[in-house]
Amino acid sequence: MRTDIRIVSPYRPFEPESPSHQTLGPFDWIAALRMLAASVRASCGCETVAITDVATALPVPAFRYPTQQSRLMLWILEVSLAYLQSDDFDRDTVFVSPDTLVLRDLRPYFGGDLTVLVRTPKKYHNRPVINAVQWWPVAAKDRLIGFYRTALARAQALPEHTIVWGADSESIRQLLEPIALGIHDRDGLQVSMREASTILISISTAIMRALDAGRPIPRLSVPIADFKGPLRKTYLAAYFEALSPSLVAS
């Protein structure tokens, strides 16, 4: 196991607030964390650690921090900040949502003080930032702490409907404006903005149909497969099992 980088993934149980989470119903997030960790071992050769609160006991490797936020979107920012402030943040780290699988090495995407995924096509004008993956170099620890403190404070002041869904990415969007590909200075932080579709793709309807039919699935050309949305999440385990026997056994 290589120790030059680490993957962290946020999770603690929440009562569903958003329509998407209410539609999803029961979902095995622990299994998702385990599948993510296996995909990371196969693709990056490094550890995956859940980040959670002190009241949540998880049967997977986890860092636990005191948190106060009772809303999911705000808590994601809070627990991210807690990790960044902690002594656990002792190496370059990639933050990855638990409803994803890593298919290729994530080391090449560190840039500046922070790397984020953005969507530049016009149809995503209102929601250009995807907060499913971020790259945090340990050399930028102090600057990242300042950025996340501000992001959390902004998120807490957002309208109720945004706190229910999207506050974590909206507060970051406000701090990163104007959105533009490349590395840019944003209030003293060097931020690398990468086109999301070159790194993360949600599995397609065609892939879901192939899984239903037991047909082989193509390996995505990007490093991360995303399972956002109630329907896609139901295919996470089947997609994981279809990737390769060696991945399932890892």
Image (cartoon, rainbow, N blue to C red):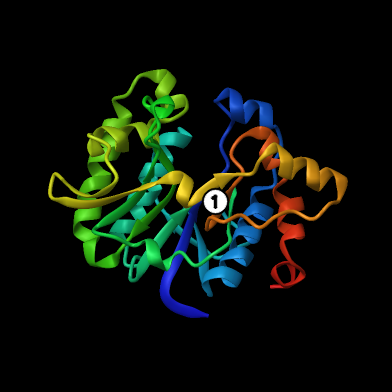
The residue at the far bottom in this view is 1
Q: Please name the residue shown 70% across and 34% down the image.
A: 231
Q: Please name the residue shown 25% across and 44% down the image.
A: 149
Q: Position of residue 207 (x, y in %)?
A: 72, 45
Instruction: Answer above or below: position of 201 versus 6.
Output: above
Q: Quadrant of the C terminus?
A: bottom right
- Please, what secondary structure does the residue beneath circle 1 have? loop
Q: Nearer the viewer, residue 248 or 90?
A: 248
Q: Please name the residue shown 38% across and 33% down the image.
A: 128
Q: Which residue is mark 1?
A: 56
Q: Position of residue 196 (x, y in %)?
A: 44, 45
Q: How many marks?
A: 1
Q: Please name the residue shown 19% across and 58% down the image.
A: 142
Looking at the image, can residue 27 be seen?
yes
Classify residue 224 by image quadrant: bottom right
26 horizontally vs 158: left or right: right
Looking at the image, can residue 52 be seen?
no
Q: Position of residue 105 (x, y in %)?
A: 49, 67
Classify residue 204 by image quadrant: top right
Question: Would you call the spot at circle 1 few (<14 residues within 10 Å), some (14-19), or many (20 or more)?
Answer: some
Q: Position of residue 69 (x, y in %)?
A: 40, 37
